[in-house]
Amino acid sequence: MPKLKNSIITEILNNLSYGDFCREDFTTHFPDNSSTFAKLIFSSMPKYTFEIEEYLTGRSNFAIAVMYQDKTERKKVIRSIESRGDYLNTEYHTHDDISGSVDRITNWVRNIREDLIHSKNTVKATIDDITAEFQSSIDEKIDNPEQYFEDQEKDDLIAKLDELKRRVESLEAEMGINPNQVKAIESAIEKSKADVDIYPKGVWYKTSGNKLMKLFKEALKDPVTDSV
């Protein structure tokens, strides 16, 4: 049985129906044997979470407390942990009672909506930075475009493609880029690495570079956030 009374749980669930969202958009947990009273997760993007917990203030290392005769008063308070917060990605708010934390839920839901609205611009800026960096890194100097890559040139180019792949993977986790688009970009990167042995320099730069730029633009048009 959850620690919270049914009336408090009902109020929590009702507060999830705010703005564009409804309670069915969230996964809820009400533990029965934990310092956490409630955990709310935005189902479409689980990085958005809200927790209500009982928190012991004045925590300190026991040995240090004895050494310095730390007499800090320790008391239990109600705390909400919110991702996203009003200003930060994660914020902690203490409350005099459970009602204060429950009231914060509507702020959290509003912050989710605002973050989703602005995240597309963040994704665009990040993709623009990555594509510009990649383009400049491979186009710095194309000597003898009809010649094939030498071994050291291949190694350098593949290292740059591996770094690009790592950055693309971080976009999926941090900014909600569509996983299918990420897989398409990763496949194109792997093919580009294989083509280093096949095509002359000029052909490789034109075909692989253009393909990757096209996929980046498609990813920008179809982020996960558009479907939420």
Image (cartoon, grey):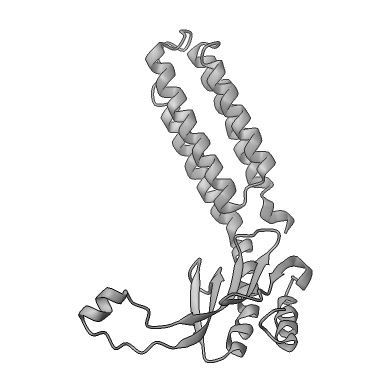
Residue 153 left/right relative to 115: left
Reply above or below: 154 against 4.
above
Q: In the figure, 92 relative to 192: above or below?
A: below
The residue lying at 58 percent from left, 34 percent from top is 213
Q: Quadrant of the C terminus?
A: bottom right
Residue 71 point in image, percent of width and height = 29, 88
- Seen from this angle, which residue lies furthest top? 147
Question: Which residue: 55% across, 27% down?
Answer: 209
Which quadrant would residue 191 be assigned to in this image?
top right
Compared with 28, 201 (above or below) is: above
Q: Which residue lies at the image location 23% right of the left edge and 85% below the top edge?
A: 69
Task: State the residue in front, 33 or 17.
Answer: 33
Q: Residue 19: where, in percent of width, then height? A: 72, 75
Residue 165 place in picture, x, y as percent = 52, 35
Q: Indicate the quadrant where residue 24 lies.
A: bottom right
Q: Nearer the viewer, residue 58 or 34?
A: 34
Residue nearer the viewer, 39 or 215: 39
Q: Is residue 167 left or right of residue 187?
A: left
- Asked whether residue 142 appears in the rendered view, the answer is no
